[in-house]
């Protein structure tokens, strides 16, 4: 990629710190990378430019002049009605849509598709199915390519893009393990179990907490539900945790799982059976769904001496498959292909 093709803008919102980390990692590789966030949240992510929808729309025209590549996230662009897509397209600038989850996780496809079925998944926070359909038709026509974080999302979007001879890339989530040191479980004390439901209905919090309430009668442990905290504050509790429970409905692991593994914690999360083979073979996550979450947690609480080793395997997994410096090179390769074909 030539030096003049290294200007990338990420918009319009931050997703669990991923956009800021991508931009930071790209800048270390010599890119001019800027991320914008117009969605105000208590999580207080610090590596993007905080703005609002009005101010973001105002920078559209100068952005078209300056940037070589537009990297959008979660099915949104600069303007709510998506008319900016035609403006960017008319200027000959390539665009990528990074689908993140509820922008494409439709009610029908999430529950059943070719080779899979998921009776647990909650899509209440997804866009309506007809709106997902409309947007995917538009994005697959206008975008140069799509990115998803795993194969749970891949199958929601692949047919649309492939029908127009567009590629869908799978890019794992990023984490900077150099900035996150492991804090392995301490088995000599009453364990602390942590769950952080930014969206309790999506994550299955009611099933998790019901199981924990039952288990209190037999096992000694502390439980902390993390909510309405900045990301920096939440991390202090993740470090103290001995076991982290992520999401038990969706069928794939989320950002909390990656952070938990990076911190050396055993992680419980539902991995849909058909998706197991799509992840690296050394995935150490302990799978649980609403039907077996209580038994899975009981088995863990019976053997807390196994937790440090499970946490160690999680840390090794993240260093191998999610380390920012490894993943960012994959993204740069995607950018090279997209710009070469523009």
Image: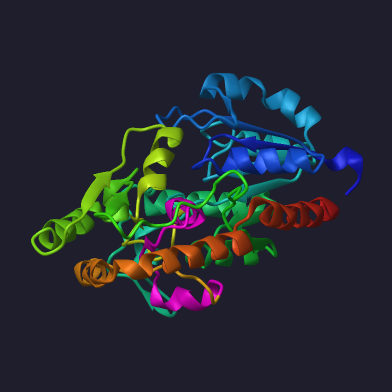
Question: Is residue 248 found left or right of 316 in the rendered image?
Answer: left
- Answer with left or right where residue 324 lies relative to residue 129: right
The x and y percentages for residue 177 are 59, 50
Residue 287 in view in this figure: no
Q: Residue at x 53, y 35 (%)?
A: 13
Q: Residue at x 11, y 61 (%)?
A: 214
Residue 100 position in % (x across, y down): 51, 51
* Residue 2 left/right relative to 65: right
User: Residue 269 or 154: which is nearer the viewer?
Assistant: 269
Among the 4 quarters of the image, the one containing residue 8: top right
The residue at 44%/63% (across/down) is 311
Would you say residue 318 sits in the magenta stretch? no
* 270 vs 195: above or below: below
In the image, 56 versus 51, the foreground residue is: 51
From the viewer's side, name the closer residue of 229 and 37.
Answer: 229
* Residue 260 in magenta stretch: yes
Spot occupied by residue 106 in the image (x, y as percentages of width and height): 39, 58
Visible residue check, residue 141? yes
Reply above or below: 42 against 179. Answer: above
How is this picture coloured? rainbow
Q: Which residues are magenta?
A: 255-280
């Amino acid at each position: 990629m030539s030096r003049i093709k290294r200007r990338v803008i990420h918009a319009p919102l931050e997703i669990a710190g991923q956009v800021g980390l991508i931009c930071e990692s790209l800048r270390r590789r010599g890119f001019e990378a800027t991320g914008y966030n117009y969605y105000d949240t208590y999580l207080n992510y610090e590596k993007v430019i905080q703005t609002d929808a009005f101010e973001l729309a105002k920078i559209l025209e100068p952005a078209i002049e300056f940037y070589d590549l537009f990297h959008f996230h979660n099915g949104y662009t600069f303007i709510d009605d998506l008319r900016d897509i035609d403006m960017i397209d008319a200027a000959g600038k390539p665009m990528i849509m990074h689908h993140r989850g509820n922008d494409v996780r439709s009610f029908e496809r999430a529950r059943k598709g070719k080779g899979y079925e998921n009776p647990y998944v909650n899509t209440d926070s997804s866009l309506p199915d007809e709106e997902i359909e409309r947007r995917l038709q538009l994005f697959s026509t206008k975008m140069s390519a799509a990115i998803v974080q795993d194969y749970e999302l891949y199958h929601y979007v692949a047919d649309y893009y492939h029908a127009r001879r567009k590629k869908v890339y799978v890019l794992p989530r990023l984490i900077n393990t150099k900035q996150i040191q492991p804090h392995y479980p301490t088995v000599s004390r009453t364990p602390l179990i942590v769950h952080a439901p930014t969206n309790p209905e999506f994550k299955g919090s009611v099933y998790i907490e019901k199981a924990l309430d039952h288990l209190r009668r037999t096992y000694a442990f502390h439980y902390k539900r993390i909510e309405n905290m900045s990301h920096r504050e939440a991390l202090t509790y993740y470090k103290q945790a001995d076991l982290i429970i992520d999401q038990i409905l969706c069928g794939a692991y989320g950002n909390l799982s990656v952070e938990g593994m990076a911190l050396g914690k055993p992680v419980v999360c539902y991995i849909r059976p058909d998706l197991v083979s799509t992840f690296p073979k050394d995935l150490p996550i302990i799978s649980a769904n609403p039907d077996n979450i209580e038994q899975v947690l009981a088995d863990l609480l019976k053997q807390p001496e196994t937790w440090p080793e499970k946490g160690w395997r999680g840390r090794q997994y993240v260093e191998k498959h999610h380390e920012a410096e490894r993943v960012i090179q994959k993204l740069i390769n995607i950018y090279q292909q997209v710009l070469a074909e523009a």
